[in-house]
Amino acid sequence: MPHRPSFPGARALVGLVLACLASCQSLTANPETEPWLITHQGKAGISARMGVGSLYEVDSVVEIQDANNDGVFGLHGVMEPVGGVGLAGEYFIIDDLALFAGAEARIFEPNLGDDLISFGQLTQYELFFGTRWFLPLRYLETERLRPFLHAKVAYIPAVDFDMTLTMVFPDLNDAVLVSPYRGSEYWSMGLGGGLAYQLSDNLYAELSFFYEWPLTNSSAEDVPTIVTQGTGNPFVDDILSLLKFDIEIEPSGWIGFFSLTYVF
């Protein structure tokens, strides 16, 4: 069965939004003015967003320094979402075409499907800018539901998590090593779209998604080691405590958001 992770509470949130759109008279009544004047040239808005789901994956390479070929591990896994929030501002340079910029915080729980190597909870912050185009289509009797397309470039200043490596030795206890990965900055690209619903003359809600992929990689060299469980052999444990790793990761995939935007 395919793995379909989602942020906690996502189904409840989406259900609540759909229920409101279907039954709340305040949302289906005609606005005081013509719909979607809020996307005309010169309008500006600020939005708050939260993550509602993702299908994110990660490719990584872990290399033990000064080791032979057996010291290189190529890993692929999923990034199970824990949560995500963000703020953004937008400005319509012409009717229905806006530029936007903002910041987000995301937390994932990587699952590499490997018995020997695991990544701890991954924290990622990003700054982004992009453009959004509201298509010349309107749905529902009130014409207040509209699709849009958007694209963005994001800067991720750092990626933090702890890598755990279990090493098995004949006739000795298994050793457990923890290495604090503090990855370098990287850039990513995102393309996607969504649906927006005008709630009032100054407010609209949206469900949106991006497919994101890295333009550069996040990496770190000379990642130190902490031996949290020794083999029972002091000589071997002393050697393990001196190990260092080179680590590189490439996260990519789908991510979805629910947003509320207030237009000035």
Image: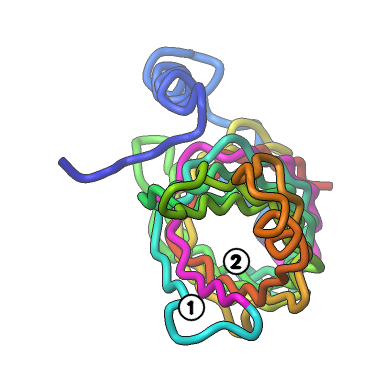
Quick one: label 1, few (<14), some, or many (20+) residues within 10 Å? some
Asked whether, in this view, residue 7 is left or right of residue 11, the answer is right
Please give the range of residues in magenta.
Answer: 40-64
Quadrant of the image occupied by residue 19:
top left
Q: Residue at x 67, y 72 (%)?
A: 245
User: Which label was assigned to residue 96?
Assistant: 2
> For the residues carrying marks 2 and 1, which lies nearer the camera in this image?
1
**What residue would you read off at disc 1?**
72
What SS does tag 2 mark?
A: loop
Can you give x and y, in whole percent of width and height, for residue 178 in the image? 68, 50
Asked if the stretch drawn in magenta spans residue 218, the answer is: no
Pick the front one: 148 or 185: 185
What SS does tag 1 mark?
A: strand
Answer yes or no: is residue 124 visible.
no
Q: Earlier in the sequence, mark 2 or mark 1?
A: 1
Can you give x and y, in whole percent of width and height, for residue 141 in the image? 35, 36
Can you give x and y, in whole percent of width and height, for residue 167 in the image? 51, 54
- Compared to residue 188, the image places residue 201 above or below, namely above
Q: Residue at x 50, y 86 (%)?
A: 68
Picture quarter with the N terminus:
top left
Asked whether, in this view, residue 257 is left or right of residue 153, the answer is left
